[in-house]
Amino acid sequence: MSASRSERPNVLFILTDDQRFDTIGAMGNPHIHTPNLDRLVDRGFAFERHFCTTPICTPARAEILTGRTTWANRVPWFGMPINPELTLLPTAFHDGGYHTIHVGKWHNDGHPRDKSYDAVHCVFAQDNRNKYQECGHLMRFEEPDGVVVGHSTDLFTDASLKALAAAPADRPWFCYLAYHAPHDPHDTPDPFSSLYDPEQMPLLANYLPEHPFDNGDMVIRDELLEPWPRRQAEMRRYRARYYAMISHLDHQLGRLLGRLRSRGQLDQTVIVFTGDQGLAIGSHGLLGKENMYDHSLASPLILSGPGVPRGRSAAMSHHVDLFPTLCDLAGLGRPASAADGYSLRPLMNGAVDRVREELFCQFYSPEQPGQAMRHTQRCLRTERWKLTWYPQIDRYQLFDLTWDPQELVDLWVPWRARQRVALETLDRAWRPDPWAGRETRPTYRQADLEAVAADLRDRLIAQMRRHGDPLLAEREPPPV
């Protein structure tokens, strides 16, 4: 039974753009300053392994808005309309009696004013009057009370504060606040622009000068922002500017959460903080998000507020799980079309230890707009293993994520797969090691690796079939 309107919490859904899962101090990053996100982690529930299906902005956002994965919502690339048969997240809350607000980046088809929002402000990119290619995050919007000009993070926060102050008092509100930060260009206002010294910024643990092979998306837009090879000084600078964007965003979140606290609304509000997908910023010799490594597939996810206990989980979660989770927390019935996700509430409450055994992820990109699909990457991830298939070159990668979370040792490199050897390279300190002090490290036999890869390949095909992957009409992953 649904809760009455007076019992329903407000919902503040905060979505960032291109934010890696490992960019919050309280989640284990000692090199970034995020005091407000740290407090949100401390008072809420944090997910350490939260993923999307397709790591690029428009498809990832479509998953959040529909509760359906890529091929079901019909958005594998930019400019593609969401399946009109699906109920959107704002529609579910609007129809459930909520006052619905959209602020910031939309980046899906149409305009949020036509997507069941009662109030719409500072919609990027549709309503930005500045040329993005020239002005970056310096944006200009014509708001009801006049023209506003400034950095996107500041403008979106200001617009949210005004919209929440104007929300009717007789019903709960749902606010979808979509920041454009920390998406490039990484132009941050003072004093945040000088917060991080590039020379003191360490390289990422899985930094490489270049990716070891062509994954099919090496010359996509994001990868052209810096030259090859990815030189160490340039990657330190890139990371410092990226972190500055996140710290600036964190400061504005502090303003927003502080205002909710002063109004007595913070404890009445379910807060969701996540990103559309991650970003490489030098990991594996890549810059962008269009790849199957965890640094690009994964985003931070923090929930707090009514019905959310304090805690953490390393269990896998997915963007499509957010729709049913929020309906659960708000006492709303989940629309039948939001069928791919699981409520995370039982996981947070300790009733189950996982909601997913595996994840299927994919990437495709047309060489030119309007061209036929060019399928470049497919991935099957379990808690321990990841098998990635590159259809353009018929190459596999196999990673043991338990021992190699940075995905540095490809167990399917031909010479390594043929050898019955221990992988001493894993003795390097990629991160604090839960197995530290043990004298043994994994020894992989050829037959064992072949069995693991064959099982993952079969599961990958099953997931492709289940999700209606159009690549199966052309071919399936070859035998390992």
Image (cartoon, rainbow, N blue to C red):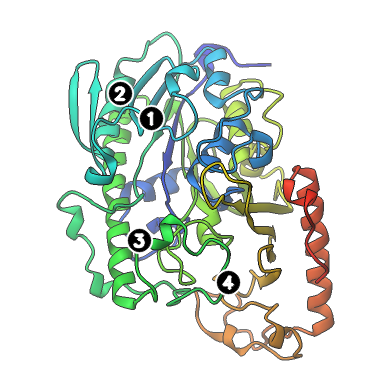
Query: Which mark's residue is nearer the viewer, 4 or 2?
Result: 4
Query: Which mark's residue is nearer the viewer, 4 or 3?
Result: 3
Q: Amino acid at mark 2?
A: Arg
Name the residue: 71% across, 24% down: 336
Is residue 236 placed above or below 28 in the rendered structure? below
**Discs 4, 2 touching: Cβ within 8 Å:** no
Between marks 3 and 2, how big is the CA–CA gap? 43 Å
> What element does badge 2 sit on?
loop
Task: Name the residue beneath numbered marker 1.
Answer: 266
Q: Amino acid at mark 4?
A: Glu
**Discs 2, 1 touching: Cβ within 8 Å:** yes
The answer to which quarter of the image holds residue 346 is top right
Task: Name the residue beneath numbered marker 4.
Answer: 407
Task: Name the residue beneath numbered marker 3.
Answer: 225
Query: Where in the figure is residue 151, as x and y percent of width and height?
Result: 22, 40
Query: Where in the figure is residue 264, as x and y percent of width and height?
Result: 34, 24
Residue 263 tag number: 2
> What element does badge 3 sit on?
loop
